[in-house]
Image (cartoon, rainbow, N blue to C red):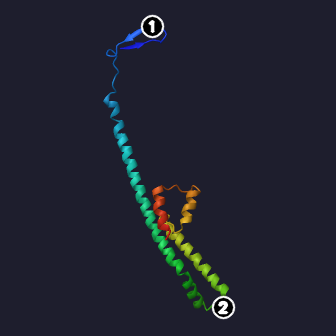
Amino acid sequence: MLVVGTPLRQPERVIDRAAVSIPKPQSNLVLPIEPQTRQQEEGRRRRGLMAMGAAVRAAAADAVVTFLWVLCASALGASTAAVTSCLGVQEGAGGHYALLVTASLLAVLLFAFDRLCGALGGASFNPTDFAASYAAGLDSPSLFSVALRFPAQVR
């Protein structure tokens, strides 16, 4: 029994709880919502797996490009010596020519690696480039992607 009224007055009405029935929701209203919720959850799970796969592919591309960059950059001195000897430029008097050859080779390397990184879907050999674009808000990768890509870019 439930008594309805104010505390200062006598109860005005007495309601029997057994006599009051609350209607239950009909099952046809609940069923259309369940499959949609399942579909949304399945979609979220698939997007999460695809994002994880994309992060792994990006980290693998970063590792390949970083390996190639380290290989080419370490051979830059030897390539400069080969080009200057092929051109017949002396090391002592024409030191400025060797600097020009080195700068030219570096420009060609950067151009080639820019094209390679674009072909690999935005791979990067420079972790500061990735960090700067993240800090500027140009890119919003997940924490999982960041955790995979930074070690792949730093060798």
Which residue does the image show at 55% across and 76% down from the upper left? 109
Q: Could you tell me residue 77's position as x and y percent?
A: 56, 83
Secondary structure of the residue carrying tag 2 is: loop
Foreground mark, 2 or 1, reads 1
Q: Could you tell me residue 126's position as x and y percent?
A: 54, 68
Q: Could you tell me residue 32's position as x and y percent?
A: 34, 36
Q: Which of these two is toward me, 143 or 34? A: 143
Q: Could you tell me residue 29's position as x and y percent?
A: 35, 31
Please say if the residues under marks 2 and 1 sit with CB atoms less than 8 Å apart. Answer: no
Which residue does the image show at 51% across and 67% down from the upper left? 124
Q: Is residue 71 above or below residue 15?
A: below
Q: Quadrant of residue 64?
A: bottom left
Which residue does the image show at 54% across and 69% down from the upper left? 114
Tag 1: Cα neighbours inside 10 Å, few (<14), some, or many (≥20)? few
Q: Quadrant of residue 78?
A: bottom right
Which residue does the image show at 33% across and 25% down from the upper left? 24
- All told, the count of numbered labels is 2
Q: What residue would you read off at disc 1?
A: 10
User: Does residue 30 appear to the left or right of 113 in the view shown?
Assistant: left
Q: What residue would you read off at disc 2?
A: 92
Q: Which of these two is toward me, 11 or 110? A: 11
The span from disc 2 to disc 1 (Cα, nearest Å) is 113 Å
Q: Earlier in the sequence, mark 2 or mark 1?
A: 1
User: Does residue 128 appear to the left or right of 53 in the view shown?
Assistant: right
Q: Amino acid at mark 1?
A: Gln
* Residue reaching furthest to the front: 8
